Image: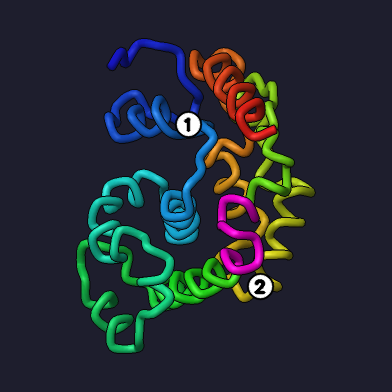
Amino acid sequence: MDKNRRRCGWCSPDSELYIQYHDAEWGVPLTGDRPLFEMLILEGMQAGLSWLTVLRKRASFKEAFDDFDPAAVAAYDDDKIEELLQNPAIIRNRLKIEAARKNGRAVLLLQQEYGSFTEYLWRFVNFQPICNTFAAMGELPAKTDLSTTISKDMKKRGMNFVGPTIVYAFMQAIGMVNDHETSCFRHAECVKLGEEFARDHT
């Protein structure tokens, strides 16, 4: 891992967790209902906190939330919610934990309607990742018309912690949007990954 490579402004060179996430995951087109559900829950957990806080607790979340199996999370009863609220290794916020359960239930319904959570999400861009060309972190939007549209649809389906800003961060995380700065070495690489992804899904 070369800490001296040019990366996006948000990626702290002092954090190996940040560098690893930035270099290997952020902006890479993601499929699979469990991985997508994981990122949705983690983005919701981040609300009001730093992403680094979430990354540090990611392994603990994975263990506590049954490897982010939507069916398992959807089936949590109130005793399980109380158990999670006593777990010091995760973010113990009742509203966020209850939202994970609600979102799991919504994902199950989406699977029934669309065949998969993957299909539901990626249809919003016709499986064509959006490639932006921002030069600096300050140019990145906090939300877009598309993230607002997706947010409204998710809320209509009973999801919580899916406001337009959270949804846009989610879109960036799963590679639906490539928001690497143009000077970042990952920008061009994610452009190619996005093109390959689009070809594979047309």
Q: Is residue 133 left or right of residue 70?
A: right
Q: Which residues are magenta?
A: 110-120
| Residue wearing tag 1 | 10
- At 45% from the left and 13% from the top, the residue drawn is 6
Picture coordinates of residue 200 (x, y %)? Answer: 61, 29
Mark 1 is on which residue type? Trp
| Residue wearing tag 2 | 157
Displayed quadrant of residue 45 = bottom left
Mark 2 is on which residue type? Arg
Q: Callout 1: helix, strand or loop?
A: loop
- At 50% from the left and 24% from the top, the residue drawn is 8
Local packing at callout 2 (Cα closer than 10 Å; few below 14, some 14-19, many 20+) is some
Residue 51 in magenta stretch = no
Quadrant where the N terminus is found in the figure:
top left
Local packing at callout 1 (Cα closer than 10 Å; few below 14, some 14-19, many 20+) is few
- At 25% from the left and 51% from the top, the residue drawn is 59
Q: Callout 2: helix, strand or loop?
A: loop
Q: Main secondary structure of the magenta part?
A: helix
